[in-house]
Image (cartoon, grey):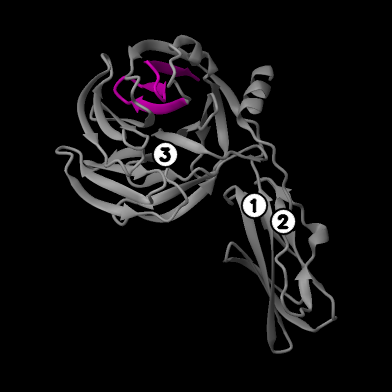
């Protein structure tokens, strides 16, 4: 428990949850009964939905929706109980459509669904230590067909690399234009997808030739980490959100919000998909979290602070970032921005 408390202090930011009533701009007769709503719920709970009829109108029926999906209806002004077990974590927008006297009126509010358990604290064993290019400001790290690929950031020095991880030798390098800050990468179906930081542009390269095939525009505030599950691509944008992207259209089709207990975990960064879970760095945090991609819950954490004691602290040495899984060895490779070492680790389950 002591180790978890230390990790929790490292990882979590202060957070205060409140329910948020949507302001009415016109005179209304009905409103959500906020007295029976809590600010936060867990997936094990149910939310009780009911309205207050301030003008004592004759109500025919009420249709309740969560995130614009109808969840049920009642005759008159009866209460509706809705279980939250299948809801993703994060804010849930509630809407009541009240049908009365030939008219319809709607009211909205929201609640927040948070994780209902503390993440497990896992440990790891260092299997090997390898050299890492100290000039590489690591943003993305991924194995593809037994070869390690790396994306490097910073304006003027952003690159796409293919490396011999055992020697640290750069086998192939492609420099981005100076106006681009390279961010996360992932490789799917022989195509390399590479994000930029604030330019809202992504690049798609042929994985064999590295020829630029196309670019795409994404409408999120920033581009950070990327990974894929063999079908879809996942990326983040500096917030607690992880977005699902259709690789054929490069359009976002879904998202989750990352939570550890009742706290949002913002600045989710470099990611790796392994056995149905997302392993992720958190920017400026000396930890790796394991995320359930179905609902956003942090299921486990690893304290990686000990690695900094094993690297050479140079003027440009920066934070932990970079996590890649080698399915051939069933081990993880982790490093940091401008670190002189890369560590092959095995997570102890």
Q: Residue furthest left?
A: 209
Q: Secondary structure at mark 2?
A: strand
Residue 342 shows up from this direction: no
Tell me the residue at 35%/44% (across/down): 195
Q: Is residue 291 magenta?
A: no
Q: Secondary structure at mark 1?
A: loop
Query: Which range is magenta?
Result: 320-349
- The label shown at residue 84 is 1
Which of 273 and 210 lies nearest the eye of the viewer? 210
In three-dimensional space, the C-alpha distance between marks 1 and 2, rounded to whole angstroms, equals: 7 Å
Residue identified by numbered label 2: 47
Which of 110 and 155 lies nearest the eye of the viewer? 155
Residue identified by numbered label 3: 225
Query: Residue 226 location, x and y as percent?
Result: 39, 40
Query: Relative to 340, is 231 above or below?
Result: below
Q: Quadrant of the N terminus?
A: top right
Left or right relative to 215: residue 261: right
């Amino acid at each position: 428990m002591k180790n978890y408390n230390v990790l929790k202090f490292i990882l979590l930011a202060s957070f205060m949850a409140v329910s948020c009533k949507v302001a009415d701009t016109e005179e209304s007769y009905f409103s959500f009964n906020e007295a029976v709503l809590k600010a936060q719920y867990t997936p094990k709970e149910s939310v009780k939905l009911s309205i207050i009829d301030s003008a004592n109108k004759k109500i025919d029926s009420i249709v309740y929706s969560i995130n614009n999906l109808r969840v049920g209806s009642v005759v008159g002004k009866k209460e509706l109980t809705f279980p939250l077990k299948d809801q993703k974590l994060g804010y849930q927008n509630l809407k009541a459509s009240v049908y009365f006297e030939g008219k319809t009126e709607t009211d909205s509010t929201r609640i927040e669904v948070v994780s209902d358990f503390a993440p497990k604290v896992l440990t790891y064993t260092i299997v090997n230590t390898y050299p890492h290019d100290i000039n590489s400001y690591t943003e993305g790290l991924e194995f593809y067909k037994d070869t390690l690929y790396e994306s490097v950031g910073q304006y003027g020095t952003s690159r796409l690399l293919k490396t011999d991880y055992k020697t640290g030798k750069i086998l192939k390098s492609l420099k981005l234009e100076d106006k681009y800050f390279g961010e996360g990468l992932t490789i799917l179906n022989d195509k390399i997808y590479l994000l930029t930081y604030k330019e809202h542009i992504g690049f798609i390269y042929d994985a064999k030739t590295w020829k630029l095939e196309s670019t795409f525009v994404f409408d999120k505030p920033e581009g950070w980490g990327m990974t894929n599950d063999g079908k879809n691509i996942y990326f983040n944008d500096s917030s607690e959100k992880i977005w699902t992207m259709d690789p054929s259209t490069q359009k976002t089709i879904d998202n989750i919000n990352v939570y550890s207990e009742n706290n949002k975990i913002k600045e989710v960064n470099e990611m790796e998909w392994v056995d149905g879970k997302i392993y992720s760095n958190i920017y400026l945090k000396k930890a790796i979290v394991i995320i359930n991609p179905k609902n956003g819950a942090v299921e486990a954490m690893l304290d990686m602070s000990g690695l900094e004691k094993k690297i050479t602290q140079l003027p440009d040495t920066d934070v932990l970032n970079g996590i890649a899984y080698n399915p051939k060895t069933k081990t993880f490779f982790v490093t940091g921005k401008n670190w002189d070492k890369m560590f092959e680790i095995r997570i102890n389950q």
